Amino acid sequence: AASGARPDPASIRRAALASLEASDGIEVDYVALVDPTGFEDLTDAGLGLPRSAPVREDAEEGPVPMGLLAVAARVGTTRLIDNTLIDLRP
């Protein structure tokens, strides 16, 4: 993201998907960037986040907006499902 600009959730999702699709032997079922508490899709939020976007508290910086990057993919006959929290600070 540009300096001071909030990361674009759709760009984060596209980058994760492109990385997986570029890997041999991986068949992607889905890649989603969602609200960790309500699983609302954040990629429709453009450059902002819904008011309900969850935050975690940082002792020095205060509230930090978070997204949950969720992935399901197949490697051979095995289906892998994983997720990770993404810090969405500018």
Image (cartoon, rainbow, N blue to C red):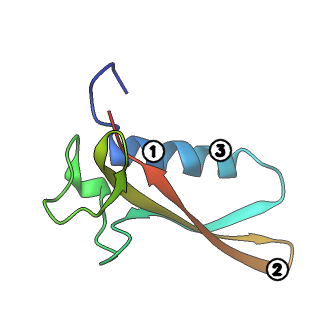
Task: Give the image location of residue 58, x and y in percent.
Answer: 37, 49
Quadrant location of the C terminus in the rendered image = top left
What's the CA distance linking mark 1 and mark 3?
11 Å
Q: Secondary structure at mark 1?
A: helix
- Residue at numbered disc 1: 12
**1 sits left or right of 28 in the view:** left
**63 sits left or right of 29 in the view:** left
- Residue at numbered disc 2: 78
What's the CA distance linking mark 2 and mark 1?
25 Å
Q: Which quarter of the figure has residue 35?
A: bottom left
Q: Is residue 77 above or below residue 89?
A: below
Residue mark closest to the camera, 1 vs 3: 1
Task: Give the image location of residue 65, x and y in percent.
Answer: 31, 52
- Residue at numbered disc 3: 19
Extreme residue in the left direction:
51
Other residues around mark 2 within 10 Å, as few (<14) / some (14–19) / many (≥20): few
Name the residue located 13 percent from the left edge and 60 percent from the top edge.
Answer: 51
Q: Which quarter of the figure has residue 78?
A: bottom right
